Image (cartoon, rainbow, N blue to C red):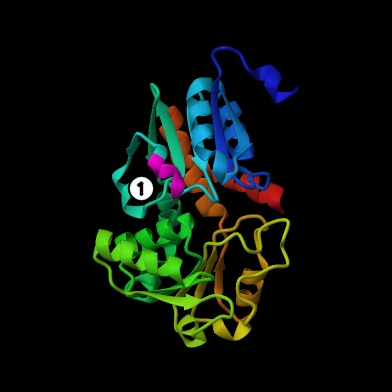
Amino acid sequence: MDILTQIDHNTKLIGVIGHPIKHSFSPLMHNFEFRSKNLNYLYFPFDIPPSNLREALKAMLVLGIKGLNVTIPHKEKIIQYLDHVSDEAASVGAVNTIVNEGGLLHGYNTDIYGIVETLNPYKDEIYKNNVTIIGAGGSARAVIYTLIRHFRVEKIHVLNRTIEKVEALRDYFKDKMHFENIFSDELIPVDNIENIKSSNLIINTTPIGMYPNISETPIDISEVFNSNQMVFDLIYNPLKTEFLKIAEAKGATIINGLRMFVEQGAKAFELWTGELMDSNKIYKELQKRLG
C-alpha cells in the first residue's frame, strides 16, 4: 500500500532533512517501529539543500510536522533557526533532532547518547588515552563533546581537509569545556602519521566510504593501524567500510556505526512519542537488511 494512503488528519508526521538524503535508513527504522507499536506516525525523507534550510523549517511549522532528524550538512547551521536548544546540543554546537512543541522548535543532540552506548564497552581502554578523529563537521562535534565529557580522553587529534575548521573546533571546545588538547592535522595528504599510530581510538566522522561510494576511504595507509587500536566508523551502510577493512587487516578492533545509528534514533523516537524503541530488535532487523 502506498504510504501516502495511510495518512489521515490524526497522523503525526516526522521526517529527516539532509543533502543528500536517499542513503538514510531512518525512514525504515522509525516506520518499522511506529507499525510495531501501532502508533499513528509516518516518517519521510526530505532532501533540503543548505540554501533552503530556513524555508524548510517554516514549511515544517505550516505542515504541522511534529519532529525532524537532522543530518549532513545541516547539524550546525540549523541551530540559529530554532527557538530552544538543549544544554547538551548547545555545548556541542550541533543539533540532530528537532521537536515541534506547539509551534516552537526545540533542538537536541541524540548523537551523544548513540556514541556513549557504542563506546561504553571500551570505556576502560579509551579513558585518559589519545584519540584521532577524521572530519570536523556536526558529527565530529558530538564525538569530541562525548569523548571529553564521558571518557576523559587525554588528547584529540583532528584530521580534516580544511585546517581552519579544526582550529575553530579547538577554540570552541577550549571555551565551552576548557579542554585545551585538540590538535589539527591535514587529512589530504595525511599529516603526522605517528599521531594516528599512537592513538588508542580512531574515529571516522565523515561520509567518505558511505554507500554508494563504498570503495572510498578517508585513510588508505595501512601502516597507521595496529592491533592495540579500536577503529570506529560512524558509517553504517555498508556495515564494514573500506576504512574498517584496512584497519581489521592490521589487527585493530573495528566498530561500525549501526549501534550508534540505532541508539540515537531510539532517543529521538522517545522525544517525539514518549515511547521507548526496542533498539535491540531494530538493530537486528537493520543488520539483517544491511547484510
Q: Please say whether residue 235 is visible from this viewpoint.
A: yes
What crowding class fits label 1: few (fewer than 14 Cα within 10 Å), some (14-19), or many (20 or more)? many
216 relative to 75 in the view: left or right: right
- Quarter holding the C terminus is bottom right
Region rendered in magenta: 76-80
Residue 248 image-quadrant placement: bottom right
Q: From what the image shows, is residue 155 above or below residue 88?
A: below
x and y, in percent, of residue 217 in the image: 65, 70
Residue drawn at point x = 42 percent, y = 28 percent: 100
- Quarter holding the N terminus is top right
Residue drawn at point x = 54 percent, y = 13 percent: 10
Secondary structure, magenta segment, majority class:
helix
Whether residue 101 appears in magenta in the rendering, the answer is no
* Pointer 1 residue: 89
128 relative to 227 in the view: left or right: left
Residue drawn at point x = 51 percent, y = 25 percent: 65
Could you say which is closer to the camera, residue 68 or residue 284? 68
x and y, in percent, of residue 75 in the image: 47, 48
Point out the residue furthest to the right here: 1
